[in-house]
Image: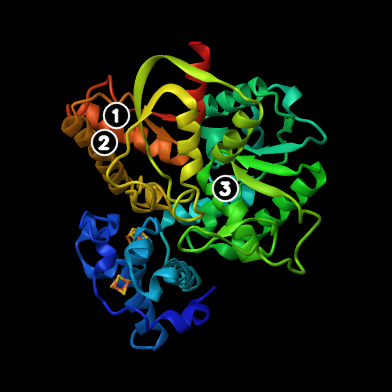
Amino acid sequence: MGLKDVKEWLHYCGRCNSCKYIYRVYEPSCPAFEKFKWEPYTSSGKVWIARDLFEGKYELSQSICDKVFACTLCGNCTIQCQQEIGDHALDIFEALREECIEAGYTIPAHLKFRENVEELQNPYGEKHDKRWEGIDDKYFKDSAEVYFFVGCTTSLRNKTLFSNILKLLDYLGVDFTLARDEWCCGSPLLTTGQKKSAKFLAEHNTDLIAKLGAKTVITACAGCFRTLHSQYPSKYGLLTNQNHFNANKEIVEKTKDTENEKDTKNIRVLHISQYLNEIIDKKNIKIKHPKEINVTYHDPCHLGRHVGVFEEPREVLKKLKGVHLIEMPRNRDNAWCCGAGAGVKSGFKDWALEISEDRLREAMQLQKTQDINIDYMISTCPFCERNLSDARKSLIDKGELSDSSLKVIDLVELINLVLKQK
Ligand code: SF4
Ligand code: SF4
C-alpha cells in the first residue's frame, strides 16, 4: 500500500485537533503529541504530510520519515477523531511508512528486524531452535484440534509465560499442539512499513496451519493475534474466516474468500483470552483466589482498538473469585498505549519507557484517589508486559513506586497463581 491507495482520504482532515485528547474528557490520547508537542508528530500532522507529499508539494526526507516512525500506531487518535478520516488514518500512517522504506529512509533497528527475519525467521536474531529449548517433545503433535501459535516474543524472550500457557492448557484438558516450523507472524515488519517482506511469513504460517488440520488457532500475543486474525486476511487474502468489527464494535461481514485463500477457510483465530472465556464456561471450571486481591487491566492496542477484543479478558477476570478488577480512567477504546508497538521500543527506547511509565502512573493515581493497593497490572500481550515491567522497575528505582504493588503479569500467569494457591 502506498499513498495512491489511500489518496481518496487525504483531504478529510479539518485540523480540528480532537485527535490529541480523549473526546469530551480532554485527557491526553496521543503519546507522540504528549512527547514532541509538535504538529508533524500527530495524527493530523501525518495526514497533512501525506496529502502534501501526494500533491508533490515537497519530497520525502529522513527528517519527515523520523516523524512518521515516531508513532506507536496505537490508533487512539482514530477513536477520538469524529470525522471520517478517523477510519482511515492508520492506513495512511502505514502507507507513509511504506513510502519511507521505498525511498530508503528508515530507522536502523527496523532494518535489522527485516534482516533477522529473512535469515532466522524471528526479529530478535536468535537461532530458530532456541524457540523450543526446554519444551517437552509431547507438545509437538502431527495434528490437534487447537494450534497454539506461540510467537517470537513469548518463545524467545518470555519462557516463563510460555510454560505458564502450556501448564494452563494442560490443566484445562485442551487437545493442542505447537509447531516446530512456526515463523514470525510478520507484525514487526508490517508495522514498520515492510509489508512486502512479510508476505513469505504469512504464506509459510498459513501453509503450516493447513497441514496441522487444526480448527482453532490461539495466540497469547496481541501483535500475533492482530496479524493472523486481521492482517493476513486484509493484506494477503489468507485465513479469511474471521469476524471483524466496525467502529461501534458490532460484528460486520467476514472477509470475503479470495483466490489466495488456501485450505484454511474454516479456521478461527482467537486470542487466548477469548478461548479461555469460552472454555472456562464450557467446562464449568471454578477458580477462586484464597484472599481478596485488586487488579487493573491494560488493554493492548493490537487486541483492543485494532481488533475490538475488550470484554473477553475482563470476563475471564470476573470469573476469578476473589479478584477485583479496578478500571483505570483510560480504558478500552481510550486506553493509553504501553509505548512498545510499531517499532518504537526498538527505535526510541527511552520514549517507549516514558509512555509505559505514564500508564503505570495512571494506575498509581487510582491507588491514591481510591486509597487502595492494586496488586497486579494485568496484560494480555508479552510485548506490553515487557515494556510495562521495564517501566515498573524504572519507577521503583526512582522511588516513585513500591515493590509491593502493580506487579505486571499476564492474565494466564494470574490464573495459574490462583490455581496454585487453591
Ligand atoms: S485527524 Fe480527525 S480529529 Fe485530528 S485534526 Fe484531523 S479531523 Fe480533527
Ligand atoms: S497512532 Fe497513537 S501515537 Fe500515532 S498519532 Fe495516533 S494516537 Fe498518536
Secondary structure under tag 1 reads helix
Q: Where is residue 299 shown, x and y percent of the image?
A: 41, 44
Q: Which residue is mark 3?
A: 225
Q: Which residue is mark 2?
A: 363
- In the image, residue 376 sits, relative to residue 358, either above or below, namely above
For the residue with label 1, is its CB less than 8 Å from the closest atom of ligand 2?
no
- Residue 420 in sight from this viewpoint: yes
Q: Identify which residue is drawn at 17% across, 34% down.
A: 369
For the residue with label 2, is its CB less than 8 Å from the closest atom of ligand 2?
no
How crowded is the residue under tag 3: few (<14 C-alpha within 10 Å), some, or many (20+)? many
Amino acid type, label 2: Ala
The tag earlier along the polypeptide, 2 or 3, is 3
Q: Which residue is mark 1?
A: 393
Q: In terms of image quadrants, where is residue 166?
A: top right
Is residue 94 or residue 367 the one in the foreground? Answer: 367
Q: Identify which residue is drawn at 49% across, 28% down.
A: 319
Q: Is there CB contact under 8 Å for labels 1 and 3?
A: no
Q: Is residue 255 left or right of residue 143?
A: left
How crowded is the residue under tag 1: few (<14 C-alpha within 10 Å), some, or many (20+)? some
Q: Is residue 176 left or right of residue 219?
A: right
Amino acid type, label 3: Phe
Between circles 2 and 3, the one closer to the viewer is: 2
Q: Identify which residue is drawn at 61% across, 31% down.
A: 281
- Residue 59 in sight from this viewpoint: no
